[in-house]
Amino acid sequence: MAGQQFEYGLDDLGNRTYANADGVGGVLAIRQLSITNTQPSTDFVATDGNGKVTALVGANDGSVTANYDYSPSGELVRADGVMANVLFAASF
């Protein structure tokens, strides 16, 4: 993986995430840039009501590329899938 680009929307407070880090959420998609493939892969970000990332979904075919599960206290308990290493807090 050569890098990542992020597409932002509004966070849970209605602010642009990259401009104001007060809220959670706001990341809509992640583009994975590859040094071996000229076409970047894009994954849409699925979040729960608390703004935690619960899944990444491939833009090309709708396949789930990663799943994330959390304990009731918000600790990550499981991450799996081909993109599971792309773990982050949705508020960046």
Image: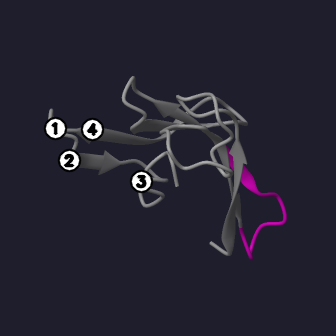
**Badge 3 amino acid:** Ala
**What's the magenta region?**
34-42
**Residue sitting at 23 percent across and 39 percent down?**
70
Which numbered marker is on residue 69?
Answer: 4
**Badge 1 amino acid:** Ser
- SS state under label 4: strand
Q: Which residue is mark 3?
A: 84
Q: Nearer the viewer, mark 4 or mark 2?
A: 2
**Mark 3 and mark 2: Cα distance apart in space:** 15 Å
Q: Which residue is mark 1?
A: 71
Which numbered marker is on residue 31?
Answer: none
The reply to whether callout 2 and callout 1 are in contact (CB within 8 Å) is: yes
Q: Which residue is mark 2?
A: 75
Residue 14 horizontal side relative to residue 21, left or right: right
47 in the magenta segment? no
**Residue sitting at 44 percent across and 55 percent down?**
88
- SS state under label 2: loop
